[in-house]
Amino acid sequence: MLDLSAHQSAAGWRPLSGPPPGRAWRSGLAANPGAPAEVLGRLLEDGAEPGWLVRRPELPGPVLEAARQHPQWTVRAALAERPGLPAQALAALAGDRERRVRRAAASAAHRTVPPPAAPAGLAVDRDPDTRRRVPGCAGLPLELLVNLAQDTSPLVRAAAVRTDSWPQLQPRVRTSLRADRDPAVRAAVRRALRVERELPVSLSGYIAESDPARRERTAASAPLERALGEWLVLDDDPRIRAAAAGNPHLPTDLALELATDPHEAVRLAVSLRADLTEAQRSAVAYRVPDVLPELPWVARRADDPAELLRLARSAHPLVRCAVASLERLPAEVVAVLAADDELAVRLALAERCADAPGELLRSVYEQLLGPASLVADPRFPAPGLARWAGRAEPALRLAALRDPAPAPELLVELVADGDPVVARAAAGDPRLPLRALLDALEPDAQPEAAAANPALPVPFMHRLLELSAAR
Protein backbone atom coordinates (compact mmCIF):
# COMPACT_ATOMS: atom_id res chain seq x y z
CA MET A 1 0.00 0.00 0.00
CA LEU A 2 1.27 3.47 -0.86
CA ASP A 3 2.97 5.12 2.13
CA LEU A 4 1.72 8.66 2.43
CA SER A 5 2.41 9.08 6.10
CA ALA A 6 4.88 11.91 5.48
CA HIS A 7 2.40 13.77 3.27
CA GLN A 8 -0.40 13.10 5.74
CA SER A 9 1.62 14.33 8.66
CA ALA A 10 2.73 17.46 6.86
CA ALA A 11 -0.81 18.23 5.83
CA GLY A 12 -2.30 17.32 9.18
CA TRP A 13 -4.62 14.62 7.80
CA ARG A 14 -6.04 12.85 10.80
CA PRO A 15 -7.13 9.17 10.64
CA LEU A 16 -10.54 8.48 9.18
CA SER A 17 -13.37 8.89 11.66
CA GLY A 18 -15.44 6.14 10.06
CA PRO A 19 -15.57 3.58 7.26
CA PRO A 20 -14.03 4.85 4.01
CA PRO A 21 -16.74 6.51 1.87
CA GLY A 22 -15.46 4.65 -1.17
CA ARG A 23 -18.37 5.36 -3.49
CA ALA A 24 -18.28 9.10 -2.76
CA TRP A 25 -14.50 9.23 -3.27
CA ARG A 26 -14.67 7.35 -6.54
CA SER A 27 -17.50 9.56 -7.81
CA GLY A 28 -15.54 12.68 -6.91
CA LEU A 29 -12.33 11.43 -8.51
CA ALA A 30 -14.20 10.56 -11.69
CA ALA A 31 -15.34 14.19 -11.95
CA ASN A 32 -12.01 15.67 -10.86
CA PRO A 33 -10.55 17.70 -13.77
CA GLY A 34 -7.09 17.21 -12.30
CA ALA A 35 -7.27 13.42 -12.21
CA PRO A 36 -4.61 11.96 -14.53
CA ALA A 37 -5.13 9.00 -16.84
CA GLU A 38 -3.60 6.64 -14.27
CA VAL A 39 -6.25 7.53 -11.69
CA LEU A 40 -9.08 7.28 -14.21
CA GLY A 41 -7.73 3.92 -15.37
CA ARG A 42 -7.79 2.66 -11.79
CA LEU A 43 -11.41 3.78 -11.48
CA LEU A 44 -12.23 1.48 -14.39
CA GLU A 45 -10.33 -1.37 -12.76
CA ASP A 46 -11.88 -0.82 -9.34
CA GLY A 47 -15.45 -1.09 -10.63
CA ALA A 48 -16.61 2.50 -10.18
CA GLU A 49 -20.09 3.26 -11.54
CA PRO A 50 -19.45 3.74 -15.29
CA GLY A 51 -21.78 6.70 -15.71
CA TRP A 52 -18.82 9.03 -15.24
CA LEU A 53 -17.60 8.04 -18.70
CA VAL A 54 -20.61 9.87 -20.12
CA ARG A 55 -20.46 12.92 -17.85
CA ARG A 56 -16.74 13.69 -17.78
CA PRO A 57 -15.86 16.49 -20.27
CA GLU A 58 -12.37 15.20 -21.13
CA LEU A 59 -11.40 11.56 -21.47
CA PRO A 60 -7.72 10.72 -22.18
CA GLY A 61 -7.09 8.38 -25.09
CA PRO A 62 -5.66 5.53 -22.96
CA VAL A 63 -8.73 5.63 -20.69
CA LEU A 64 -11.09 5.61 -23.67
CA GLU A 65 -9.31 2.58 -25.12
CA ALA A 66 -9.33 0.80 -21.74
CA ALA A 67 -13.08 1.43 -21.43
CA ARG A 68 -13.65 0.15 -24.97
CA GLN A 69 -11.94 -3.12 -24.13
CA HIS A 70 -13.29 -3.39 -20.58
CA PRO A 71 -14.55 -6.88 -19.65
CA GLN A 72 -17.79 -5.50 -18.18
CA TRP A 73 -20.42 -4.71 -20.80
CA THR A 74 -21.90 -1.92 -18.65
CA VAL A 75 -18.65 0.04 -19.00
CA ARG A 76 -18.57 -0.42 -22.77
CA ALA A 77 -22.24 0.57 -23.04
CA ALA A 78 -21.63 3.70 -20.96
CA LEU A 79 -18.76 4.61 -23.26
CA ALA A 80 -21.06 4.23 -26.28
CA GLU A 81 -23.39 6.84 -24.77
CA ARG A 82 -20.59 9.38 -24.42
CA PRO A 83 -21.30 12.59 -26.45
CA GLY A 84 -18.76 13.26 -29.15
CA LEU A 85 -17.31 9.75 -29.09
CA PRO A 86 -14.71 9.36 -31.88
CA ALA A 87 -16.15 7.64 -34.93
CA GLN A 88 -13.63 4.79 -34.83
CA ALA A 89 -14.43 4.01 -31.20
CA LEU A 90 -18.14 4.03 -32.03
CA ALA A 91 -17.52 1.67 -34.93
CA ALA A 92 -15.69 -0.75 -32.63
CA LEU A 93 -18.56 -0.68 -30.12
CA ALA A 94 -21.04 -1.27 -32.95
CA GLY A 95 -19.37 -4.65 -33.45
CA ASP A 96 -19.29 -5.51 -29.74
CA ARG A 97 -20.09 -9.05 -28.66
CA GLU A 98 -22.77 -7.84 -26.21
CA ARG A 99 -26.09 -6.86 -27.79
CA ARG A 100 -26.75 -4.15 -25.17
CA VAL A 101 -23.53 -2.42 -26.15
CA ARG A 102 -24.47 -2.64 -29.83
CA ARG A 103 -27.87 -1.13 -29.02
CA ALA A 104 -26.19 1.78 -27.26
CA ALA A 105 -23.84 2.22 -30.21
CA ALA A 106 -26.75 2.21 -32.68
CA SER A 107 -28.47 4.95 -30.68
CA ALA A 108 -25.21 6.92 -30.43
CA ALA A 109 -24.88 6.77 -34.23
CA HIS A 110 -27.88 9.14 -34.39
CA ARG A 111 -25.54 11.86 -33.03
CA THR A 112 -22.20 10.90 -34.59
CA VAL A 113 -21.63 9.90 -38.21
CA PRO A 114 -19.89 6.51 -37.93
CA PRO A 115 -17.69 4.85 -40.58
CA PRO A 116 -19.85 3.17 -43.26
CA ALA A 117 -19.09 -0.31 -41.96
CA ALA A 118 -20.74 0.41 -38.60
CA PRO A 119 -24.35 0.99 -39.75
CA ALA A 120 -23.93 -1.77 -42.34
CA GLY A 121 -23.08 -4.22 -39.58
CA LEU A 122 -25.82 -2.94 -37.27
CA ALA A 123 -28.41 -3.23 -40.06
CA VAL A 124 -27.87 -7.00 -40.21
CA ASP A 125 -27.47 -7.50 -36.47
CA ARG A 126 -29.20 -10.59 -35.14
CA ASP A 127 -30.91 -8.47 -32.44
CA PRO A 128 -34.04 -6.74 -33.85
CA ASP A 129 -33.93 -4.16 -31.05
CA THR A 130 -30.53 -3.10 -32.37
CA ARG A 131 -31.68 -3.07 -36.01
CA ARG A 132 -34.70 -0.90 -35.24
CA ARG A 133 -32.37 1.88 -34.05
CA VAL A 134 -30.41 1.97 -37.31
CA PRO A 135 -32.88 4.02 -39.45
CA GLY A 136 -32.08 7.05 -37.32
CA CYS A 137 -28.31 6.77 -37.88
CA ALA A 138 -26.67 9.88 -39.30
CA GLY A 139 -25.72 9.55 -42.96
CA LEU A 140 -27.49 6.21 -43.43
CA PRO A 141 -27.09 4.98 -47.04
CA LEU A 142 -30.30 4.55 -49.01
CA GLU A 143 -29.71 0.86 -49.69
CA LEU A 144 -29.57 0.13 -45.95
CA LEU A 145 -32.79 2.06 -45.38
CA VAL A 146 -34.51 0.05 -48.12
CA ASN A 147 -33.29 -3.20 -46.58
CA LEU A 148 -34.52 -2.18 -43.13
CA ALA A 149 -37.93 -1.28 -44.57
CA GLN A 150 -38.16 -4.90 -45.73
CA ASP A 151 -36.75 -6.43 -42.53
CA THR A 152 -38.22 -9.64 -41.14
CA SER A 153 -39.08 -7.87 -37.87
CA PRO A 154 -42.12 -5.57 -37.88
CA LEU A 155 -40.40 -3.43 -35.22
CA VAL A 156 -37.62 -2.69 -37.68
CA ARG A 157 -39.93 -2.13 -40.64
CA ALA A 158 -42.01 0.33 -38.63
CA ALA A 159 -38.89 2.20 -37.48
CA ALA A 160 -37.72 2.53 -41.09
CA VAL A 161 -40.95 4.27 -42.14
CA ARG A 162 -40.79 7.96 -41.31
CA THR A 163 -41.93 11.15 -42.95
CA ASP A 164 -38.42 11.91 -44.19
CA SER A 165 -37.59 8.36 -45.26
CA TRP A 166 -40.85 7.48 -47.04
CA PRO A 167 -40.13 9.45 -50.25
CA GLN A 168 -36.76 7.71 -50.58
CA LEU A 169 -38.28 4.23 -50.78
CA GLN A 170 -39.02 2.65 -54.17
CA PRO A 171 -42.70 2.40 -55.20
CA ARG A 172 -42.73 -1.39 -54.82
CA VAL A 173 -41.42 -1.10 -51.24
CA ARG A 174 -44.00 1.54 -50.36
CA THR A 175 -46.77 -0.62 -51.82
CA SER A 176 -45.63 -3.56 -49.71
CA LEU A 177 -45.51 -1.45 -46.56
CA ARG A 178 -49.01 -0.10 -47.11
CA ALA A 179 -50.30 -3.67 -47.19
CA ASP A 180 -48.06 -4.93 -44.38
CA ARG A 181 -49.62 -7.60 -42.22
CA ASP A 182 -48.46 -5.90 -39.01
CA PRO A 183 -50.67 -3.05 -37.70
CA ALA A 184 -47.65 -1.17 -36.27
CA VAL A 185 -46.10 -0.94 -39.73
CA ARG A 186 -49.35 0.21 -41.31
CA ALA A 187 -49.69 2.84 -38.55
CA ALA A 188 -46.17 4.07 -39.32
CA VAL A 189 -47.13 4.39 -42.98
CA ARG A 190 -50.20 6.44 -42.06
CA ARG A 191 -48.07 8.76 -39.92
CA ALA A 192 -45.55 9.16 -42.74
CA LEU A 193 -48.31 10.00 -45.20
CA ARG A 194 -50.16 12.35 -42.91
CA VAL A 195 -50.23 15.84 -44.38
CA GLU A 196 -51.39 18.68 -42.22
CA ARG A 197 -54.32 20.46 -43.74
CA GLU A 198 -53.90 24.18 -44.19
CA LEU A 199 -55.76 26.31 -41.69
CA PRO A 200 -58.90 28.01 -42.98
CA VAL A 201 -58.61 31.70 -43.78
CA SER A 202 -62.20 32.44 -44.86
CA LEU A 203 -65.33 32.63 -42.77
CA SER A 204 -66.95 29.72 -44.61
CA GLY A 205 -63.85 27.55 -44.10
CA TYR A 206 -63.74 28.40 -40.40
CA ILE A 207 -67.42 27.56 -39.90
CA ALA A 208 -66.85 24.21 -41.64
CA GLU A 209 -63.90 23.39 -39.37
CA SER A 210 -65.01 20.99 -36.62
CA ASP A 211 -61.72 20.60 -34.73
CA PRO A 212 -61.62 23.04 -31.75
CA ALA A 213 -57.81 22.98 -31.63
CA ARG A 214 -57.55 23.92 -35.32
CA ARG A 215 -60.09 26.68 -34.80
CA GLU A 216 -57.96 28.19 -32.03
CA ARG A 217 -54.81 27.85 -34.14
CA THR A 218 -56.64 29.58 -37.00
CA ALA A 219 -57.59 32.47 -34.75
CA ALA A 220 -54.01 32.76 -33.49
CA SER A 221 -51.95 32.55 -36.66
CA ALA A 222 -53.84 32.15 -39.94
CA PRO A 223 -53.80 35.02 -42.50
CA LEU A 224 -57.42 35.91 -41.82
CA GLU A 225 -59.78 37.39 -44.36
CA ARG A 226 -61.52 40.45 -42.92
CA ALA A 227 -64.91 38.77 -42.69
CA LEU A 228 -63.38 36.01 -40.57
CA GLY A 229 -61.60 38.57 -38.37
CA GLU A 230 -64.90 40.38 -37.76
CA TRP A 231 -66.44 37.05 -36.78
CA LEU A 232 -63.62 36.10 -34.39
CA VAL A 233 -63.62 39.31 -32.35
CA LEU A 234 -67.28 38.59 -31.53
CA ASP A 235 -66.73 34.94 -30.61
CA ASP A 236 -68.30 33.83 -27.31
CA ASP A 237 -65.14 31.92 -26.30
CA PRO A 238 -62.56 34.23 -24.64
CA ARG A 239 -59.76 31.85 -25.69
CA ILE A 240 -60.66 32.43 -29.33
CA ARG A 241 -60.83 36.19 -28.82
CA ALA A 242 -57.44 36.18 -27.03
CA ALA A 243 -55.92 34.13 -29.85
CA ALA A 244 -57.32 36.51 -32.46
CA ALA A 245 -56.13 39.54 -30.48
CA GLY A 246 -52.56 38.27 -30.78
CA ASN A 247 -52.80 37.33 -34.46
CA PRO A 248 -50.64 39.78 -36.43
CA HIS A 249 -52.88 39.23 -39.47
CA LEU A 250 -55.93 40.63 -37.68
CA PRO A 251 -56.43 44.25 -38.83
CA THR A 252 -55.47 46.79 -36.19
CA ASP A 253 -58.91 48.38 -36.05
CA LEU A 254 -60.51 45.00 -35.30
CA ALA A 255 -57.91 44.24 -32.63
CA LEU A 256 -58.63 47.54 -30.92
CA GLU A 257 -62.29 46.51 -30.62
CA LEU A 258 -60.99 43.97 -28.07
CA ALA A 259 -59.09 46.58 -26.04
CA THR A 260 -61.98 46.82 -23.56
CA ASP A 261 -62.79 43.10 -23.53
CA PRO A 262 -64.03 41.88 -20.10
CA HIS A 263 -61.35 39.16 -20.01
CA GLU A 264 -57.82 40.09 -18.89
CA ALA A 265 -56.11 37.63 -21.24
CA VAL A 266 -57.78 39.24 -24.25
CA ARG A 267 -56.81 42.77 -23.22
CA LEU A 268 -53.23 41.68 -22.51
CA ALA A 269 -52.94 40.10 -25.97
CA VAL A 270 -54.13 43.35 -27.54
CA SER A 271 -51.63 45.41 -25.55
CA LEU A 272 -48.72 43.29 -26.82
CA ARG A 273 -49.40 43.65 -30.54
CA ALA A 274 -46.56 44.94 -32.70
CA ASP A 275 -48.77 47.27 -34.73
CA LEU A 276 -49.97 49.48 -31.87
CA THR A 277 -48.67 52.95 -31.18
CA GLU A 278 -47.49 53.67 -27.65
CA ALA A 279 -50.62 55.76 -27.11
CA GLN A 280 -52.85 52.87 -28.19
CA ARG A 281 -50.86 50.43 -26.05
CA SER A 282 -51.09 52.63 -22.96
CA ALA A 283 -54.87 52.96 -23.36
CA VAL A 284 -55.37 49.21 -22.80
CA ALA A 285 -56.07 48.15 -19.22
CA TYR A 286 -53.99 45.00 -18.73
CA ARG A 287 -52.45 43.10 -15.82
CA VAL A 288 -48.90 41.74 -16.02
CA PRO A 289 -49.06 37.92 -15.64
CA ASP A 290 -46.76 35.84 -13.45
CA VAL A 291 -45.27 34.11 -16.51
CA LEU A 292 -43.83 36.48 -19.08
CA PRO A 293 -45.08 35.75 -22.62
CA GLU A 294 -42.80 35.38 -25.64
CA LEU A 295 -42.87 38.26 -28.14
CA PRO A 296 -41.34 36.98 -31.40
CA TRP A 297 -41.95 40.28 -33.14
CA VAL A 298 -39.51 41.97 -30.77
CA ALA A 299 -36.82 39.40 -31.55
CA ARG A 300 -37.27 40.07 -35.27
CA ARG A 301 -36.15 43.66 -34.65
CA ALA A 302 -32.84 42.60 -33.08
CA ASP A 303 -30.83 44.10 -35.96
CA ASP A 304 -32.48 47.52 -35.77
CA PRO A 305 -30.77 49.60 -33.00
CA ALA A 306 -33.15 52.55 -33.35
CA GLU A 307 -36.22 50.33 -33.06
CA LEU A 308 -34.74 48.51 -30.07
CA LEU A 309 -34.12 51.80 -28.32
CA ARG A 310 -37.69 52.86 -28.98
CA LEU A 311 -39.06 49.60 -27.60
CA ALA A 312 -36.74 49.78 -24.58
CA ARG A 313 -38.57 52.99 -23.67
CA SER A 314 -42.02 51.51 -24.21
CA ALA A 315 -44.64 52.16 -21.57
CA HIS A 316 -45.38 48.42 -21.52
CA PRO A 317 -43.06 46.51 -19.13
CA LEU A 318 -43.50 43.25 -21.04
CA VAL A 319 -42.27 44.87 -24.24
CA ARG A 320 -39.25 46.15 -22.35
CA CYS A 321 -38.72 42.67 -20.86
CA ALA A 322 -38.77 41.20 -24.35
CA VAL A 323 -36.07 43.62 -25.47
CA ALA A 324 -34.02 42.91 -22.34
CA SER A 325 -34.23 39.17 -23.07
CA LEU A 326 -32.35 39.47 -26.37
CA GLU A 327 -28.87 37.98 -26.26
CA ARG A 328 -27.02 40.99 -27.70
CA LEU A 329 -28.02 44.63 -27.39
CA PRO A 330 -26.44 48.01 -28.26
CA ALA A 331 -24.80 49.77 -25.33
CA GLU A 332 -27.36 52.60 -25.36
CA VAL A 333 -30.25 50.13 -25.11
CA VAL A 334 -28.52 48.24 -22.28
CA ALA A 335 -28.05 51.48 -20.35
CA VAL A 336 -31.75 52.32 -20.64
CA LEU A 337 -32.87 48.86 -19.53
CA ALA A 338 -30.34 48.60 -16.69
CA ALA A 339 -31.89 51.74 -15.18
CA ASP A 340 -35.48 50.52 -15.64
CA ASP A 341 -37.78 50.98 -12.65
CA GLU A 342 -39.26 47.49 -13.12
CA LEU A 343 -37.28 44.73 -11.40
CA ALA A 344 -38.62 42.21 -13.96
CA VAL A 345 -36.95 44.17 -16.76
CA ARG A 346 -33.63 44.35 -14.95
CA LEU A 347 -33.84 40.66 -14.09
CA ALA A 348 -34.53 39.73 -17.73
CA LEU A 349 -31.50 41.77 -18.77
CA ALA A 350 -29.32 40.11 -16.12
CA GLU A 351 -30.42 36.59 -16.98
CA ARG A 352 -30.64 36.70 -20.77
CA CYS A 353 -28.43 39.44 -22.22
CA ALA A 354 -24.72 38.81 -22.67
CA ASP A 355 -24.14 42.59 -22.64
CA ALA A 356 -25.67 43.13 -19.20
CA PRO A 357 -23.30 45.13 -16.95
CA GLY A 358 -21.76 43.25 -14.05
CA GLU A 359 -22.96 45.71 -11.43
CA LEU A 360 -26.52 45.06 -12.54
CA LEU A 361 -26.06 41.34 -12.01
CA ARG A 362 -24.76 41.90 -8.50
CA SER A 363 -27.60 44.23 -7.52
CA VAL A 364 -30.28 41.95 -8.95
CA TYR A 365 -28.73 38.88 -7.36
CA GLU A 366 -28.45 40.49 -3.95
CA GLN A 367 -31.99 41.82 -4.14
CA LEU A 368 -33.61 38.56 -5.23
CA LEU A 369 -31.09 35.92 -4.15
CA GLY A 370 -31.59 35.13 -7.83
CA PRO A 371 -30.83 31.98 -9.80
CA ALA A 372 -27.58 30.31 -8.81
CA SER A 373 -26.49 30.39 -12.45
CA LEU A 374 -25.73 34.09 -12.05
CA VAL A 375 -23.01 33.27 -9.53
CA ALA A 376 -21.00 31.39 -12.15
CA ASP A 377 -21.66 33.94 -14.87
CA PRO A 378 -18.38 35.47 -16.14
CA ARG A 379 -20.12 38.86 -16.22
CA PHE A 380 -20.68 38.69 -12.46
CA PRO A 381 -18.44 41.24 -10.66
CA ALA A 382 -16.62 38.99 -8.20
CA PRO A 383 -14.24 41.31 -6.25
CA GLY A 384 -15.69 42.10 -2.85
CA LEU A 385 -18.21 39.27 -2.76
CA ALA A 386 -16.38 37.67 0.17
CA ARG A 387 -18.24 40.10 2.39
CA TRP A 388 -21.38 38.02 1.79
CA ALA A 389 -19.87 35.01 3.60
CA GLY A 390 -21.53 36.04 6.82
CA ARG A 391 -24.97 36.62 5.36
CA ALA A 392 -27.90 34.55 6.55
CA GLU A 393 -28.99 33.62 3.03
CA PRO A 394 -27.19 30.50 1.73
CA ALA A 395 -27.34 31.84 -1.83
CA LEU A 396 -25.26 34.86 -0.85
CA ARG A 397 -22.75 32.76 1.09
CA LEU A 398 -22.42 30.64 -2.04
CA ALA A 399 -21.78 33.78 -4.07
CA ALA A 400 -18.97 34.72 -1.68
CA LEU A 401 -16.92 31.91 -3.21
CA ARG A 402 -16.83 33.91 -6.46
CA ASP A 403 -14.50 36.44 -4.84
CA PRO A 404 -11.09 36.10 -6.54
CA ALA A 405 -9.15 36.47 -3.27
CA PRO A 406 -11.08 35.12 -0.27
CA ALA A 407 -9.19 34.66 2.98
CA PRO A 408 -8.18 31.00 3.52
CA GLU A 409 -10.00 30.93 6.85
CA LEU A 410 -13.20 32.02 5.09
CA LEU A 411 -13.00 29.00 2.78
CA VAL A 412 -12.39 26.71 5.75
CA GLU A 413 -15.41 28.20 7.48
CA LEU A 414 -17.65 27.67 4.45
CA VAL A 415 -16.67 23.99 4.18
CA ALA A 416 -18.42 23.55 7.53
CA ASP A 417 -21.43 25.63 6.43
CA GLY A 418 -24.81 24.36 7.52
CA ASP A 419 -26.12 24.52 3.97
CA PRO A 420 -24.95 21.44 2.02
CA VAL A 421 -24.77 23.31 -1.31
CA VAL A 422 -22.44 25.94 0.16
CA ALA A 423 -20.35 23.32 1.96
CA ARG A 424 -19.93 21.21 -1.20
CA ALA A 425 -18.93 24.22 -3.27
CA ALA A 426 -16.33 25.26 -0.70
CA ALA A 427 -14.94 21.72 -0.43
CA GLY A 428 -14.44 21.69 -4.20
CA ASP A 429 -12.71 25.09 -4.30
CA PRO A 430 -9.09 24.60 -5.42
CA ARG A 431 -8.00 27.50 -3.17
CA LEU A 432 -8.97 25.57 -0.05
CA PRO A 433 -5.92 24.96 2.18
CA LEU A 434 -4.65 21.39 1.89
CA ARG A 435 -5.27 20.50 5.51
CA ALA A 436 -8.90 21.61 5.26
CA LEU A 437 -9.24 19.78 1.94
CA LEU A 438 -8.04 16.54 3.52
CA ASP A 439 -10.40 17.04 6.46
CA ALA A 440 -13.26 17.44 3.97
CA LEU A 441 -12.52 13.92 2.69
CA GLU A 442 -13.83 12.52 5.96
CA PRO A 443 -17.04 10.44 5.82
CA ASP A 444 -18.93 12.99 7.92
CA ALA A 445 -17.75 15.97 5.84
CA GLN A 446 -17.85 16.47 2.06
CA PRO A 447 -15.97 13.43 0.70
CA GLU A 448 -17.28 13.55 -2.88
CA ALA A 449 -16.76 17.28 -3.39
CA ALA A 450 -13.31 17.14 -1.82
CA ALA A 451 -12.29 14.18 -3.99
CA ALA A 452 -13.39 16.22 -7.03
CA ASN A 453 -11.20 19.17 -6.00
CA PRO A 454 -8.52 19.64 -8.71
CA ALA A 455 -6.05 20.80 -6.03
CA LEU A 456 -6.02 17.34 -4.43
CA PRO A 457 -2.47 15.97 -4.88
CA VAL A 458 -2.29 12.95 -7.18
CA PRO A 459 -0.69 10.71 -4.49
CA PHE A 460 -3.75 11.30 -2.31
CA MET A 461 -6.00 10.35 -5.24
CA HIS A 462 -4.28 6.97 -5.42
CA ARG A 463 -4.51 6.65 -1.64
CA LEU A 464 -8.27 7.19 -1.74
CA LEU A 465 -8.60 4.41 -4.30
CA GLU A 466 -6.55 2.08 -2.14
CA LEU A 467 -8.65 2.82 0.93
CA SER A 468 -11.83 2.33 -1.13
CA ALA A 469 -10.61 -1.05 -2.36
CA ALA A 470 -9.60 -2.12 1.16
CA ARG A 471 -13.06 -1.52 2.55
Image: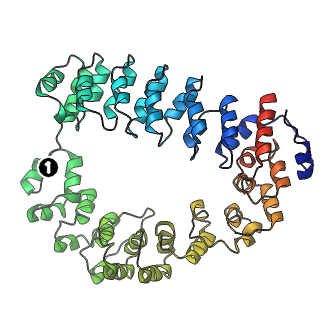
Where 145 falls versus 334 (above or below)? above
Q: Quadrant of the C terminus?
A: top right
> Quick check: can you spot residue 7?
yes
| Position of residue 356 measured from the top left corner of the image (x, y, whole percent) | 50, 74
Q: How many marks?
A: 1
The residue that label 1 is drawn on is: 198
| Position of residue 248 measured from the top left corner of the image (x, y, whole percent) | 21, 66
Q: Nearer the viewer, residue 455 or 152?
A: 455
- In the rendered structure, which amino acid carries the disc numbered 1? Glu
Q: Residue at x 72, y 35 (%)?
A: 23
Q: Residue at x 34, y 34 (%)?
A: 137
Q: Residue at x 43, y 35 (%)?
A: 108
Q: Residue 37, located in which quarter of the rendered image? A: top right
| SS at circle 1 | loop
> Quick check: can you spot residue 47?
no
Where 457 falls versus 232 (above or below)? above
Is residue 57 found left or right of 147 in the rendered image?
A: right
